[in-house]
Image (tube, helix red, strand yellow):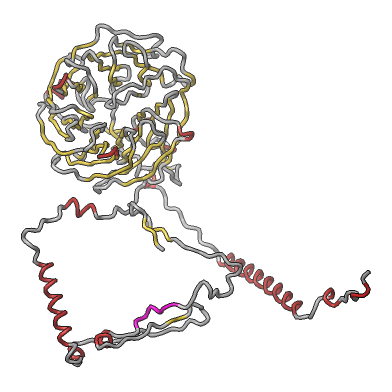
Amino acid sequence: VLNVASDGSNIIPVSAVVPRKTHADFHADIFPDTREDIPQVAVTEWLTGINTTPRIVSLDPAKRQSFAPVTTTESTASLSTLPNQIQPLLDSTKNSISDIQMQINTPDSASTTIPTAIKNSAKVNLPKHSAYRFITGKSNTDYDDLKGLSVNFPNETDAFQINSKFIAFSISGPGGRVGVWPVESKGRFPVKIPCIVNGSEMLDFRLDPFNVHRLITGCEDGRIRIFDLPANGLTDDLYQENNFFPAHNGRVVLLQFHPMALDIIMSYSPEQGSPLIKIWNICTKKLISTMTLPDQALSVAFSYDGNCIAAILRDKTIRVYDSHTGLELQSGPSHQGTKAARILWIGDTGRLVSVGYARANQREIIQYDSQNLTLPVCSTPLDTSPSMLIPFYDHDTGLLILCGRGESVVTFYHLSTEPEPLFLTRYSVPGGIRQLSMALLPKRHCNVKEIEVLKGFRLTPTSVESISFTVPRLQKEYFQDDIFVSTRDVENPALSADEWTMKKSGTVKLIDLKPADMQLLSTAPVEQKVIRKTVDLVVEQTEYERKEASIKAMFDIAMEKSKQGPLPQDLIEGVADDEWD
């Protein structure tokens, strides 16, 4: 029996075996005579009414016979020789077949055409090759004994931020507290972690990607606060009462830095029933543009160059806006569930990917074309779970990383030019410690000598773990230039705030990750395959023959002894019955 996997990725043979003491004999009780699979009657014979009993054959290899199939040559002339009572039957059959063919070739005008999306959904997504199929993970608890962590934060926020200098996470307590800890200070957290104190309930916070010592927060009072972190980290709670500006009339739920321009941020607020996205210059605290949304947003994201903003709304739609003017460019259907969703741009491809919920809490991945949001490019159902997925996308490798809040697994997909995402693997954290969030470092912090493609941190209820993902390779002494392409410099801006405001286009800076002491894998010499010598083959053949001769000699001795007659103990006579007392 051949069993096809539900995702079409494998065909698995299934065998049923009955245990028996010996396999040398044919077991007729298990394999009775069966019907032969060769036809016994030709077409013309069956049409004339000839019936034949199927031939029964034995499955015993010793009795198996070979039969030639019945051959027949059909032609128009042979049909004419049939009896007169059979010819009308053939004519009516031909006419029926012709009528059916005409109905198939000429569909009814009232019939509907099958949509392309339904036709494509019937295709099986067979596994494709990926250099990252065998990606493996490793996690270490570098910072433990974390106490007072706040877990009451909105679904829209990650509540966890990292850069090369600091780790930031939400701490419970009055005043909207954000714990900030130096990356280099590994070990146990103190009982009281130094915090940033906002003075109002904090909903979201972000570390500036272009300034490792700056952190901004969005609060319940509608203000955006800006904090400058000391170079050596916090030694006590930090209050900055003066460095803030009122951004919205309602609570600030989401914040995001521009991916290319310095000092440009995006903020989102439900605005007490009139949701707004605003673009700010936090250096001058001036408003640049405003986007009015028809419903509350579940997630928002800057495009690769920052010129567009994508938003998933509670009205089950996805919308794309011009970040300079605030005008809506495209809109279309999105996830049918309104519990939570996240949106990302797939690098500079112009495509988008979102994770959210369909009906009945079924999680799903949807891909879109930002130039045409009328219909999604592809929808991929996942599983049924209340846990919200936090997605990450690595533009260099095309990896989509899904981190489930409250789960202990990290799932990997590969996004390519194919519509369907390719499932790669699922990394389960040892110990099953559930995660609240995860964050990744820029690619330049990866150890390329160990083929480390992703590096970051994982936030758990009681610790912060470092997490690393590597790809197995044989020739680690060479720089894997097929994996580590020139990567985008995400830690230095390509534009100033004024340049972006004037709609200037910046050039994305690239970083070469190749160490000076490593040679490219693409230029490495080709390894010569070792060819076995003929002498070794002769030795193996001689050894095999020696074993065969030894086994044959043992069988010959056993057979010879079995022909020597009864054993001595079989010839011993016992006492007579009358000799017993």
Above or below for 215 versus 424: above
Question: Which residue is painted at 44% across and 23% down in the image?
Answer: 462
Above or below for 283 versus 260: above
Question: Which span is picked out in magenta?
Answer: 34-39
Residue 22 sits in quarter: bottom right
Horizontal arrangement in the rendering, residue 379 relative to residue 52 (left or right) = left
- Single out the residue that lies furthest toward the top: 241
Horizontal arrangement in the rendering, residue 328 relative to residue 8 (left or right) = left
Q: Nearer the viewer, residue 196 or 435?
A: 435
Percent x, y for residue 479?
Answer: 40, 41
User: Is residue 15 in view?
Assistant: yes
Residue 510 part of the magenta-drawn span: no
Q: How many marks?
A: 0
Q: Nearer the viewer, residue 227 or 555?
A: 555
Percent x, y for residue 4?
Answer: 36, 57
Q: Nearer the viewer, residue 71 or 278?
A: 71
Residue 109 sits in quarter: bottom left
Percent x, y for residue 484?
Answer: 35, 39
User: Is residue 168 in view?
Assistant: no
- Single out the residue that lies furthest toward the left: 109
Horizontal arrangement in the rendering, residue 264 relative to residue 571 (left or right) = left
Question: Which residue is painted at 29% across and 16% down in the image?
Answer: 202
Question: Which residue is painted at 34% across and 11% down in the image?
Answer: 174
Our reading of the magenta stretch's main secondary structure is loop
Q: Name the quadrant of the N terminus.
A: bottom left
Q: Name the quadrant of the C terminus.
A: bottom right
Question: Which residue is painted at 37% across and 24% down in the image?
Answer: 164
Percent x, y for residue 460?
Answer: 42, 26
Residue 114 sits in quarter: bottom left
